[in-house]
Structure formats: C-alpha cells, structure tokens
Amino acid sequence: MARRERVVRMSVEQPLWRALTAYRVLTMLYAIGLFATAYDRFVRPGIAVGYYCALCVWTLATLPRVANAASCTKRFLAADLTVALTGILLTPAADSHARIVEGGSTLPSIWTAGSVLAFAVKGGWRWAAFASTLVAAADLAERGALTRGTAHNVVLVWVAAIAIGYVVEVARASERTLARALEIEATTRERERLARDIHDSVLQVLAMVQRRGAVLGGEAAELGRMAGEQEVALRTLVSGGLLPVSRVSEDASEGAVVRAVEEPETLDGDGGTVDLRTLLVPYAGARVNLAEPGAPVPLPPAAARELAAAVGAALDNVRRHAGEDARAWILVEDEPGEVVVTVRDDGPGIADGRLAQAEGEGRLGVALSIRGRLRDLGGSAELVSVPGQGTEVELRVPKDASSARGKAERR
C-alpha cells in the first residue's frame, strides 16, 4: 500500500501582508478625503490632484505586490518608498507655508507608514529602521525645522516600524522552531511504525532461527549464532533511529514547510469499516481461545489492522516468554464508545522491572508493537502481570479512531 506525503505550509506573517494590503487602500482614501476637506486652503491644488491621481493608480495597481513576501521585491519597495517621499517633498509646492508650520498633514499623510511597514514585514527591523530614517529626513526637509509635532511623528513611525520588524523576525524564528518540532514528531512516528513492522516480522524470524539452531546443533547452531548477532544489530538500529529528522524546508515567501508521511487508509467493508473479528480469528488455535460478541465489531480499517497487530504482538510475547505450551485467551468487548480486547495467558508472569530492562536492551515488543500502536490510535494499552499468575494485556481503541488519532497527534 503506497504512502503519500502530506505537505503542511506554515506562515505566521501572511496575515500581516493581508492587513498591509487593506491598510494601503484605507490610508489612500483617508489622504484623499483629508485633501478634499481642505481643498480651498491649498495654494496649488493642481499639484496635489496630480499626485493623488498617481497615488491612487499606484496603490490599486500594486495590491498584488503586497500580497506576500515573494511578490514584494526590493525593487518594488524602493519604488513604493519613492512615491511616499515624493509626496512628502511635494507638499511645500502644493500647500501654504502657514499650514505646514501649523502642523498640516503631508500629501500622502499616513499612507507613508504603509511603505515603511512593508520594509518591516519583508526584511525585519533593520530594513524598517532604514526606511523610517529616510521618511524622517524627508519630513524634516518638508517642515524646514524640527518642531514638536514633527519629532513626535518621526519617533512614532520609527519606533512602530522597528517594533513590528522585530516581532516579524521573532515570529519567523518561532515558526521555524515549530516546523522542526512537527517534523521531528512526524519522523519519530514513522520510525516507530517501521520499528513495529520490523519487530513483527524480521526480528521474530531471526529469534526463531537462533532458537532452532541452538536446538539442532552443528551447522545450524552456527547459523543460529549469526542470526542472533544480526538480531542484536537490528534491534540496536531500530532503537537508535532509522530516519533523519532534519527534513524541514524553509521558504521566506510562503513560510516554513513540513513534510509528513502518511499511510492511506483503504476503506473496506460497508461504511468504511471492517469487522475486527475477521482479523482476530486467525490467531485462535488449540492453545489460544477467542471469545467474541455475536455481532460484528466495526472499526476503521487502519485501526482494526493496528489493533489486530497489537494482539499478535501480545501472543508472540506469550509464546516467546511463557513457552509453546502456554495457553492464552482473547476477549473482545464491543462497548458504546470503544472496543476493548484483552489478552491473558497462564504463563509465569513478568518480573518487576523486566519491561524497562528489555526496552533498554532494544527489545521493543511492548513499547512499540503494543503500546505504540494503541497510542497512535488515541487508545491505551495496560499490562498487568503477577509473577506466577500469568499476564494480562488490556487494549482499548476508540471507535472513532480517525479523530482520536488526530487528537493524539496534536498532543
């Protein structure tokens, strides 16, 4: 069954670009409205009208340019800032000196801040400081002197732009960190899935060859010894890691990208479910008794397969640790919100601390093949063992395993 790669694109700055797009349009309308209310006070209103026509065309034509970081190039930023600076420097030619001294607004008014903010979102606080410094110099040239109002406006734009630029840089760093954490989590889950598959197949065969070779002796014993060495090496590889974890790619224009490998769920049976009983029947035998409800036990295909594989891993542990003569019982309970499968044996039980020791040695049957499978489904696996009284493994899987699995991954 082919796997598919799910690509998750993350961008914490994209909302800033959308806000900047709306800001430019609204501030353009504000500047034009401000001019309209004081039209009769301008000494050369024709200059202002010409500038506002150019500003309107430029703002509307360049809206796609401020839609994302990729479109907002350095050349566009330079041209956009030039439009703002030109409007500031044209103000003395259009407006009266008295109005300028009284603190009258420049032609672009607060539209200028949009150009500076574009620098901040695109390049961070350093770019914002550069753009706001040029705007401050243009304001001083337009006023002809440093007044309290001019200083207030300059400092406000300068501080706001630098602060926003710094926040953008921090957000990008956090975004990369989160993307790497999600990638590590996805890689870890894939590694555990491969480790379960290896444990349920290759490692069990190698262990069986080792045991049979020791019993037969001769050349078979040598083959068994080699199989045992390969088993140890493979367990070490599985417990140490199978896949690299650095697969996060970064794209400043669209945000960080996380690629996660998913197993497609093939829908079997009616309503996209399968009867768990059909997957557990093959485990029944002379020494394994299966007790099931009289009605079907429907589960999503992936959940049913994983639950059946966990039951198989539990029975394999019974044969391996309790011996070939040990008896086992499988009890299936179909409860309203979940399915419970209990596997019990009459073996000698597990000594205290043995599970932790086995996991440290790379023997991950319980940790991965049982608990790992149930955890990925949003379920749980409880193991109770009393030395001399056998072992009981209780497996619980919610019926809505797909949504439960999503919740487990988010945790």
Image (cartoon, grey):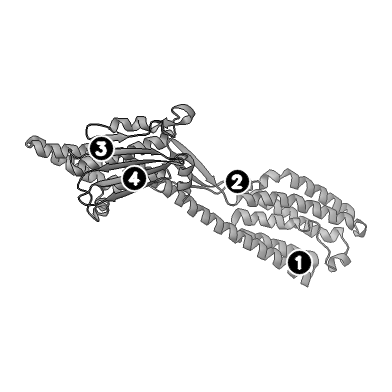
Secondary structure state at the residue bearing disc 1:
helix
Secondary structure state at the residue bearing disc 4:
strand
Say which of 232 and 352 sits in front: 352
Q: Amino acid at mark 1?
A: Leu
Which tag is nearer the camera, tag 4 or tag 1? 4
Task: First in sequence, mark 4 or 2: give its number.
Answer: 2
Q: Quadrant of residue 207?
A: top left
Secondary structure state at the residue bearing disc 3:
helix
CA distance for labels 2 and 1: 33 Å
Q: Residues within 10 Å of mark 4 (few under 14, many from 20)?
A: some
Q: Quadrant of residue 84?
A: bottom right
Q: Amino acid at mark 3?
A: Val
Q: Where is mark 4, residue-wise?
A: 394
Q: Residues within 10 Å of mark 2 (few under 14, many from 20)?
A: few
Q: Is residue 243 visible?
A: no
Give the residue drawn at x 60%, y 52%: 13
CA distance for labels 4 and 2: 53 Å
- Horizontally, residue 364 falls left or right of residue 222, namely right
